[in-house]
Amino acid sequence: MVNWTRDFFICLSNSKFLNKSAQKWGFRFGAEKFVAGTDIGSVTRTIKEMNARGISCTVDNLGEFVSEKTEAESAKRQILNMLDKIREEKLDCHVSVKLTQLGLDISREFCIQNMLEILARAEHYGIFINVDMEDYAHFQATIDVLKILLQNYGNVGTVIQAYLRCAEDVMDELKDIRLRIVKGAYKESEAVAFQTKAEIDRNYLKLAKKRLLGDAYTSIATHDHNIIRALEDFIRENNISHEKFEFQMLYGFRQEMQYELAEKYHFTTYMPFGNDWFGYYMRRLAERPQNINLIVKDVFYT
Ligand code: FDA
């Protein structure tokens, strides 16, 4: 059942037609529980609320797999405006971006130019930019672009997906930069990715522990209480400095646990906003079919 629903929602998340249509619908099917606002004004209010509770944020202007230059340029402008807002309002917040939103599928050079503009402004303001990791079809291109960006800027990092068989090698190659460790949200083939939860969890723990023993900053991004508790024990037993890591979770997930972790460690909530919510929300439903009741409520009770 879980695999069936996972495949179904991942398939919906990839539909260009539905992603485009959903931009005109406004939030539907309970998406507002996981998307922090439609525009910069509304997401800023939510960030301020989280900051007041001692929680830092990473903001994501929703959108991916863009095929028109004008769309990528408009996404870039929105990200630049968000950077201005973070600076203006002194928000405790950095920015997560997806390279396919900034034109990676149009041309690598065009995407790099957009990223250089974003990184220049972010560096000027002292803001970190995280390059989110997308599906495996974009994996190598993302790493290649990141390496070019790293030649010019130090305020950029990326994500390691523990389901990928090559995760440890790539993580080691990027050992000096800030990284976020996640399990991985896309459907990938057996050839490139572990398929079972047990294998993915085992690799996640291995990667996170290795990072925690190294020097660079690590974001431990998961809602999995078993992994979190195991890593808390590891941190205590190995006397790992709290300045070297943080926990991260997605907006709308396990709120009480977010507050609990924020009392003890640096903590960041991933805050998506914007009208392009469909693909992101379908991936969240794929991970947690229990959330389907949000759709049922939306369809039958509103
Ligand atoms: P998983 O979904 O396996 O859950 C483990 C267990 O935790 C469940 O069995 C359940 O017991 C419990 N649990 C989980 N959610 C719960 C809930 N809401 N309530 C109660 N119990 C719950 N992916 C990617 O490919 N590229 C990226 O760039 C990112 N970025 C990213 C940033 C951040 C901050 C996070 C948290 C995640 C991502 N991801 C991601 C998504 C990631 O790859 C993964 O798909 C999700 O985090 C789901 O996996 P979990 O680690 O939460 O465990």
Image (cartoon, grey):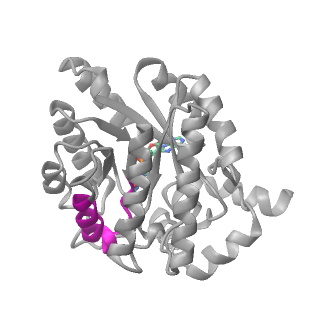
Q: Nearer the viewer, residue 212 or 128?
A: 128
Question: In the image, is residue 193 above or below residue 36?
Answer: below
User: 283 or 25, which lies in front?
Assistant: 25
Give the residue at x 20% y 38%.
Answer: 211
Q: Closest to the observer: 284 or 3? A: 284
Residue 98 x, y percent position in the rendering: 43, 61
Q: In this picture, is 156 found above or below 86?
A: below
Residue 8 horizontal/vertical position (percent) = 53, 73
Q: Quadrant of residue 85?
A: top right
Horizontal arrangement in the rendering, residue 295 relative to residue 51 (left or right): right
Residue bounds of the magenta highlight: 131-148
Q: Which residue lies at the image location 59% right of the left edge and 23% below the top edge?
A: 53
Q: Does residue 57 belong to the magenta stretch?
A: no
Q: Is residue 128 left or right of residue 190?
A: right
Does the magenta-highlighted stretch encompass residue 135? yes
The structure residue drawn at horizontal position 57% and vertical position 48%, both measured from the top left corner, is 82
| Left or right of 301 on screen, residue 53 | left
